[in-house]
Structure formats: C-alpha cells, structure tokens
Amino acid sequence: VLKHPQMPDLVKVGSTERTPEERAEELSSATGVPGPFQVVFRKPARRPLKAELKTHRLLSEYRWSPDREFFEISEKEAVEAIEEVTPM
C-alpha cells in the first residue's frame, strides 16, 4: 500500500516484483508527481498477482479509475482488505 501526501483520500494497492520502496521511488520519479510516495504497508504473498486481483475485486466500488490501482479508502481499510485475501 502506497500513499502520497498530496492525495490524502487515495491509496495505491498493488503487487510488485521489486521492493515496495523501489516501486514507490519509480512512481515518485514520474513527471508531474509533486513529491514522493510512501510505503505504508507490505505483505508477502505466495501468489501475489492472485492476491492483488482478489484485493482489487474486494475494493472495486472504491476504485478511483478502472485502469489505475488507486482506491478512495483509508490505509486501514486497504490493510484489512489485503489481510482478508492473504491470510497467514
């Protein structure tokens, strides 16, 4: 889960093959982004793409745009959804 201080009502929820910090840095370096993204939660998954898909389905009504991984929810809600689809 990534957060940006200039987007207080949105969180980015997705999987990555890199570290979350590397992904945040990649997003932060894009032209037009007013500062860095922050990693607020991470959870390893055995099948990350499947976990991502299930999480996105669970949060679909909060999705900001159909082609983006941004959701209009709190960090806590994002973490709860991830925990629900990727139990230990």
Image (cartoon, grey):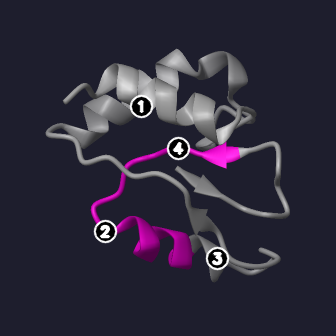
Tell me the kind of residue under disc 1. Answer: Ile
What residue is disc 2 on? 18
Answer whether labels 1 and 4 touch (C-beta < 8 Å). yes
Residue 66: in magenta span? no
Q: Residue at the left extreme?
A: 46
From mark 1 to mark 4, how far is it between C-alphas? 9 Å
Q: Is residue 44 left or right of residue 60?
A: left
What residue is disc 3 on? 28
What residue is disc 4 on? 13
Q: Position of residue 47 (x, y in %)?
A: 18, 37
Question: What residue is at 63 percent from the left and 44 percent from the top?
Answer: 68
Question: What residue is at 14 percent from the left and 40 percent from the top?
Answer: 46
User: Which residues make up the magenta segment?
Assistant: 11-26
Q: Earlier in the sequence, mark 3 or mark 4?
A: 4
Tell me the kind of residue under disc 3. Answer: Ser
From mark 2 to mark 3, how far is it between C-alphas? 15 Å
Can you tell which mark lies on residue 82?
1
Question: What residue is at 38 percent from the left and 20 percent from the top?
Answer: 84
Q: Quadrant of residue 75?
A: top right
Q: Considering the numbered disc 1 on the image, is that residue within a helix, a strand or a loop?
A: helix
Tell me the kind of residue under disc 4. Answer: Val
Residue 14: in magenta span? yes
From mark 2 to mark 1, how far is it between C-alphas? 18 Å
Q: Residues within 10 Å of mark 1 (few under 14, many from 20)?
A: many
Tell me the kind of residue under disc 2. Answer: Arg
Q: Position of residue 27 (x, y in %)?
A: 59, 71
Q: Residues within 10 Å of mark 3 (few under 14, many from 20)?
A: some
